Structure formats: C-alpha cells, structure tokens
Amino acid sequence: MRTTTAPARAGSLDQLLAAKEIVVSCGSGGVGKTTLAAAAATMAAVRQGGKVLVLTVDPAKRLADALGVKGIGNEETRVPKAAFTDAGITPRGELWAAMLDTKQSWDTLVRRHAPDARTAGEILANPLYQNVSGRFVQSHEYIAMERLYEIHNEGTYDLIVVDTPPSRNAIDFLEAPEHMAEFFSSRLLRWLIVPYRSRVVNFASRPFYQVADRILGTQFLQDIAEFFMLFQTMYDGFVKRAHAVERLLHERRTTFMVVSTLEAAPLREAEQFIDVMSKKGFHLGAVILNKVLPDYMRSDRSAEVADRLRDRGDELSQALAPGLAEPAQIHRVLDEVAESFLNFQVVACREAEQQAELAVTPEVVASVPYFDTDIYDLAGLARLGEQIWS
C-alpha cells in the first residue's frame, strides 16, 4: 500500500523563507504589516544571502522611509551598502525595494498584450484609458499580482517579499486574477460592445441602452464601446496571463505571512483572512503577532512578587519611607503597581491562549513585543527582524 508523507513544517521564519521564493505579507491597516515585511526581507538578505526584493503594493511610503531609500517606484532600487554599514550590519546578500506604480504597470501590460503597436497606441491614447484603467474591477490588486509575476519570471531575485494593502483589500488581491479573467468574459462587457459591433440591439438589451443613452449620451457610450472593443483584442493574452498569475499564488514556493495584533478587530480580520486562504488552497506559512506582552508577565514567580508587594505593603512602605515619602503614600503606589501587573498578567495569559489557537494552521507563529521607539531605519528593522527570525 502506497503511503504519502506530509511536507515537513518549518520551525522558524528562517527555515520557511529559505524554502520559498515568494512571501505575500497580509494584515489589517496599522498592525505593522509593512514594517514586518521589510524586517523579514532585511533578515533574509543579511542571514541567507542572495538577492532579496521587498515590493510594496500599499501606496504609503513607510517602506521607503524605513529602508532609507528615497524615491523608490516601479523599478527596483538597491538598498545601498552604506545604509548597512551605518547600521553596523554586514549582509551576506543584497536587499532591493520597489513600490508599485499602477499607471506605468498598466501601460506596460497593454503594450505586451495588444496584437500590434497600432492597437496599443490607440488604447493608450484613448481619453478614457487613464481614468478607466485605474477603475477596473480589482485593477490595483490585479496589476500588483501581474507585476509580481513579471518580476518572479525574470528570475533576478532569490526571494520576493510582497507587502499588500490591508486585509480586506488583500482578499481582493487573492481573487484579482480570477476576477480579471471573468471581466473579459462578462455580460456587461458584451452588452457594451455588441450593439456597436453588430449594430443590432436585441429586445432584451434595448431598454438598457435607451436609459443609458438618456443619462450618459450617445457619444460617451460609443467612446466606451470603442475602448472596450480595442481592449477585447487583448482577451487571449490577458486571460492566459491571469490564469498564470493565479497558478503562481498556489505554487509550493509561494507562501503567505499574516500579520496582526491581538486586539479584537485586527485579530478578527486576520482570522477571516486565514479562513479564506484555507478555503482557496493558499499556503499559510506564518502568522506574526505584533505588540504582544512579554512572556515573563505570565510566570508564576512574577505573580508571586506582585502578590507580596500588595500583601506586605505595610512592611515595605515602612522600610522605604525614610527620605522618600509618607508610608501611606508608598503603600498606595505599591498596591497600584501590584494590581496593575496582575491585570496585565490576565491579558498576557489571554494572549497566550489566542496564540495557541492561531498556531494550529500556519507553519510558524512568531510574536513581537512592544518596542519603546518607532522603527525608522535599517538598524531598527534588523532589531525587529531578530524577534521573528528564529
């Protein structure tokens, strides 16, 4: 009887990233997703070597600020050696960064899939193009996936870490290739095009065009139809490419890293996203929990210290009183400190239970404690990366 063996699970982010070529970082807004994506990429470049790219789809410029790279755009930019030297780090490999430029990426896509240069020129020159290309269903998310596919196919990088928009949009991100393929086959597109292609409006669609004509005007409808007829010439290329992008997201060398805090709202979004990923068959490699209370807060010994502060307040306040404050005032402070610690311990224990529940599905669960200062440079990214790496 033939038996199958489940793939070995990575024990750390170090092991997980060593086995992957693409890591897609997802999470709610404000949980530190962009910074942690940059930290993971930094650690891979420093510890594992090779060429590592961090690509952000989020329009915020936090990634560039954290890496100390100004003016990054669609083209990849290498983080200079001097930035590592200033941070006191000697990397084994190279770290690169890029930020998605939707308009530029759409132009490139049109030139690639148009049947000839004349058609590409007509599409790019169409007055509706610049507006419509940014408003397609899943436009931004699809073009991000397209850009990822293009960069991966070039084979320049050993690892690509992609920072996506917040998780509600990240679900759109996962579905973007599928939606783009559906768009080119959609009833709406056929309705817009057929009357102007065949000059025959059937009984069912006539009311739609009569209403649309009164609201939008005949010329506007013709402009839209002409534009989409030009776009239809790229149908085969787009659909084929969309399916290829979808396959890339499901490949064994692609994994997802979900970032969240343990606050109720972002945790609920993360759990929903994990559920969607599971149903769609994507590989969940890691869950990174940010701003988690430290382990020592859960220890029995720490709780015993807090209990003694509270129970022996009279004795301790008398001992500390000379030259400090009135014993009663010291007693109140000791009570407050002890009670506050015990309350935090309850939260820390609840967080540990939540971590245990989340650890069932991903290969790696890592937590990051509160940092006293913001992460604003490469040295800070490396310190943050150390927390999640092994």
Image: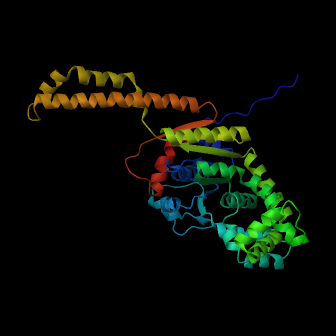
Question: Which residue is found at the position 74% from the left and 77% from the top?
Answer: 126
Q: Is residue 155 left or right of residue 51?
A: right
Quarter of the rendering occupied by the C terminus: top right
| Residue 113, picture quadrant | bottom right
Residue closest to the eye, 23 or 18: 23
- Number of numbered tags placed on the structure image: 0
Residue 77: percent from left, percent from top? 59, 66
Q: Is residue 298 left or right of residue 126?
A: left
Residue 141: percent from left, percent from top? 67, 57
| Residue 300, picture quadrant | top left
Residue 224: percent from left, percent from top? 76, 72
Question: Which residue is found at the position 32% from the left and 21% from the top?
Answer: 304
Residue 119 in sight here: yes
Question: Which residue is found at the position 60% from the left and 63% from the top?
Answer: 99
Q: Is residue 281 left or right of residue 331?
A: right
Q: Is residue 307 left or right of residue 183?
A: left
